[in-house]
Amino acid sequence: MQAILYVCHGSRIAKARAEASSFVEQCKANINVPIQELCFIELAHPNIVTGIDICVQKGASRIVVLPLLLLSAGHAKHDIPEAIRQAKQRHPHLEIVLGEPFGVHEMMIDIVVDRIKEQAVPLDHESMILLIGRGSSDPDTKRDITAIAKLLQAKTNVPRVDICFLAAIRPTLEDGLYEASRSFYKKIFVVPYLLFTGVLMKTIEKQLRSLSSSNKQWILCNYLGYHPFLQNMIKENAQILLRANKGA
């Protein structure tokens, strides 16, 4: 029997966990698979191995594991595969197919543009965008955020899109805000490239409150959230993996 296991990051913040759960429920309604479960990489329960156990207990013989992650970094490359390896030791006859994070995708750019358009302030030649990534020691993270920034600039036609990160990579959030404050752009759209609310979003809000640039208009956009476009991507990815032949 087929199953889907949705893997979210996890958070200590109850609202973030609730957002993930609500989004997965919406995804389940769009996919005709008898067994669909939610699990978390860290900071919440159930974890991935337990999520696989639950699917097996419900009769799953083949599980499609879908990481609800923005980019392919340490969690996608190491933590999820390691959890799958542990689960396979417990269930040696179980087939597990692992999907990919959302990655650098045109639809992700469309989500960012939507978050910017939600603001009452329009983008124009006096505007720049500061795209804030979570950050990771994995070098692919900076490469991917840079690629997303270039696609975003091409789609919005703003003269400048800078990037910065909340952890592990430079430029830091402080670096990004400092460079933006020194620029001649009057409107700075601060875009958190984050999937859910939580501690990191609060960090951005706190840093923005500390700024004293009277000649700048700082516009904090909403984090990406579980946008409807993501449901389309997940359904498409799930259907491809559900149809894949065993061992392919």
Image (cartoon, rainbow, N blue to C red):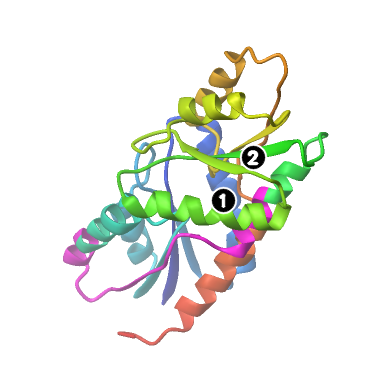
Q: Residue at x 72, y 52 (%)?
A: 156
Q: Would you say residue 24 is visible in this rendering?
A: no
Q: Secondary structure at mark 1?
A: helix
Check disc 2 and give the amino acid type. Ile
Q: In which quadrant of the rendered image does the N terminus lie?
A: bottom left
Of the two numbered discs 1 and 2 on the same chain, state the one appearing first in sequence: 2
Check disc 1 and give the amino acid type. Ala
Residue nearest the observer in this picture, 46 or 227: 227
**Range shown magenta:** 86-112
The residue where tag 2 is placed is 129
- In the displayed structure, 18 sits above or below 103; it is above
Name the residue at the left extreme: 89
Residue 119 left/right relative to 190: right
- In the displayed structure, 244 sits above or below 101; it is below
Q: Is label 1 in contact with label 2 (beta carbons under 8 Å)?
A: yes
Q: CA distance from mark 1 to mark 2?
A: 9 Å
Where does residue 177 sit, x and y in percent of width and height?
A: 55, 27
Q: Would you say residue 197 is visible in this rendering?
A: yes
Q: Does 111 lie within the magenta span? A: yes
Q: Secondary structure at mark 2?
A: strand
The residue where tag 1 is placed is 149
